[in-house]
Image: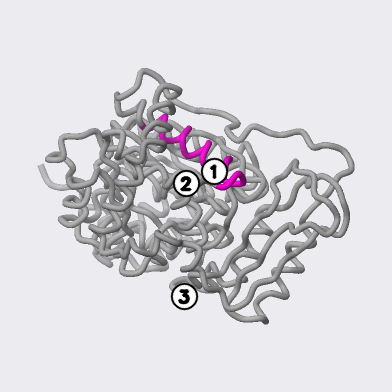
């Protein structure tokens, strides 16, 4: 029987006309993309066709699997542990990965965590970890395996050989107005996560003014797609829809977020870190439950809290940093490692309750202070960012500090200050507190 020949133009036309692509056609198209046999113009046309016409559940599963298998894949077989990871759709001050990886590893699971960099108004885990002197985020799959085998967790970036199809498609999505496609987002996220050889995955899908998706319903639909795709691939998957209406925790930036997490791991958490700690324990609890070490997510949360409190997670963190080349002596006094060129304190112009803000605007202010990128691949400042002195619902007296801004140069402060002052809202009446976890989606 002769092998079916698939032509990229036929795949484009078929999807353009709203017809369902076969697994063979999807696999051949993805392979052609990676081998540079499909021109950028044709890839762009296919991306727009998918954006306009959508994909069936079977097509999406086939696309995710083809992208996952387009390059090197991590093999966790020899670890002898349940592999589980967490993925967040991105937010402001969203540093939970830095706590979750050592907590879940200390509980007894393997956490192969392949993370990303800052994108738009959202921060990036790799940019935060690279503020630790000497810390290496670019490891081979062999090194990745060895670190996990030793301490249970490892945090690295996507390698050139890992899911290369995603790197090519993602770059063109950014230029073709197709970034917001739920199908393409799902395939991008899930192909990378499944390439970690995961058996369990917990998704933290953000909702609210600082979320990447524009509405609650859009975030929910994305969460459903990712859960179905993960389950179809044999990976136990659950999604938590969580609020992103204000920065998570006390700090937003790069080193300042590492500092905040180090304080938590050492048992010295600041009161304004309470929401971040609570969410980290909840997500960890689900991971521990999926890994079979607890009878429920609530029981998993109890285990997570215990390994955080008894210092086990802190010891895993120190070992992971050491194995990845980092200088752990900076954690002895993390505040002294923070050396911004300039600081400015925003104080309340009136007394009242902090009623809310546009969290996305806050994220863009952090980016323009220097903590995020102006262009893909550009530099970020280790010391730029903000410190929140109040959370939504807190009463603030006139003249009291609201936010401290950190930047490298004086001229970087003006626009972010205007943005922050313009978005903070106050009320004379007490503000109703909203639960951080809004909804949980599982099979």
Q: Is residue 25 visible?
A: no
Nearer the observer: mark 1 or 3; the answer is 1
Say which quarter of the image contains residue 92: bottom right
CB under 8 Å between discs 2 and 1: yes
Q: Please identify the dominant SS of the magenta region.
A: helix
Q: Position of residue 310 (x, y in %)?
A: 37, 36
As measured in the structure, the alpha-carbon distance from the residue carrying label 2 to the one carrying label 1 is 10 Å
Say which residue label 2 marks.
264
In the image, residue 199 sits, relative to residue 425, either above or below, namely: above
**Quadrant where the C terminus lies?**
top left
Q: Is residue 334 visible?
A: yes
Q: Which region of the structure is painted magenta?
A: 270-287
Q: Position of residue 221 (x, y in %)?
A: 54, 36
Q: Secondary structure at mark 2?
A: helix
CB under 8 Å between discs 1 and 3: no
Q: Position of residue 186 (x, y in %)?
A: 43, 44
In the image, residue 36 sits, relative to residue 98, either above or below, namely: below
């Amino acid at each position: 029987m002769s092998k079916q020949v698939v032509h990229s133009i036929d795949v484009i036309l078929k999807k353009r006309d709203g017809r369902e692509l076969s697994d063979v056609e999807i696999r051949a198209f993805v392979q052609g993309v990676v081998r540079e046999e499909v021109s950028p113009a044709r890839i762009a046309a296919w991306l727009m066709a998918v954006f306009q016409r959508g994909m069936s559940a079977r097509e999406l599963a086939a696309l995710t699997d083809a992208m996952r298998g387009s390059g090197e894949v991590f093999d966790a077989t020899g670890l002898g542990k349940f592999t589980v990871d967490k993925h967040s759709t991105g937010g402001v001050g969203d540093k939970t990965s830095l706590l979750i990886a050592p907590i879940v590893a200390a509980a007894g699971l393997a956490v192969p965590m392949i993370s990303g960099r800052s994108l738009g108004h959202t921060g990036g885990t790799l940019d935060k970890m690279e503020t630790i002197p000497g810390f290496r985020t670019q490891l081979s799959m062999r090194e990745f395996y060895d670190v996990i085998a030793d301490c249970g967790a490892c945090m690295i970036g996507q390698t050139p050989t890992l899911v290369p199809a995603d790197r090519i498609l993602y770059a063109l999505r950014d230029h073709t107005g197709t970034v917001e496609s739920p199908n393409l987002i799902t395939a991008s996220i899930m192909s990378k996560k499944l390439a970690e050889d995961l058996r369990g995955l917990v998704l933290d899908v953000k909702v609210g003014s600082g979320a990447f998706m524009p509405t609650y319903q859009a975030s929910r639909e994305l969460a459903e797609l990712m859960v179905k795709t993960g389950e179809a691939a044999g990976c136990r998957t659950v999604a938590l829809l969580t609020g992103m209406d204000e920065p998570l925790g006390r700090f937003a930036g790069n080193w300042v977020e590492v500092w905040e997490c180090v304080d938590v791991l050492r048992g010295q958490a600041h009161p304004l870190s309470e929401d971040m700690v609570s969410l980290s324990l909840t997500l960890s609890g689900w991971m521990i439950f999926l890994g079979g070490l607890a009878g429920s997510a609530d029981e998993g949360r109890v285990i997570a809290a215990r390994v955080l409190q008894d210092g086990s997670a802190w010891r895993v963190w120190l070992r992971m940093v050491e194995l990845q080349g980092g200088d752990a002596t900076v954690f002895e006094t993390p505040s002294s490692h923070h050396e911004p060129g300039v600081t400015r304190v925003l104080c309340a112009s009136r007394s009242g309750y902090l009623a809310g803000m546009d969290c996305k605007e806050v994220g863009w202010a952090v980016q323009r202070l220097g903590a995020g990128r102006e262009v893909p691949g550009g530099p970020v400042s280790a010391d730029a960012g903000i410190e929140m002195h109040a959370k939504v619902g807190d009463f603030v007296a006139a003249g009291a500090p609201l936010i401290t801004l950190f930047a490298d140069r004086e001229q970087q402060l003006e626009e972010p200050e205007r943005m922050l002052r313009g978005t903070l809202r106050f009320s004379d009446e007490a503000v109703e507190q909203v639960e951080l976890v809004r909804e949980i989606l599982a099979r």
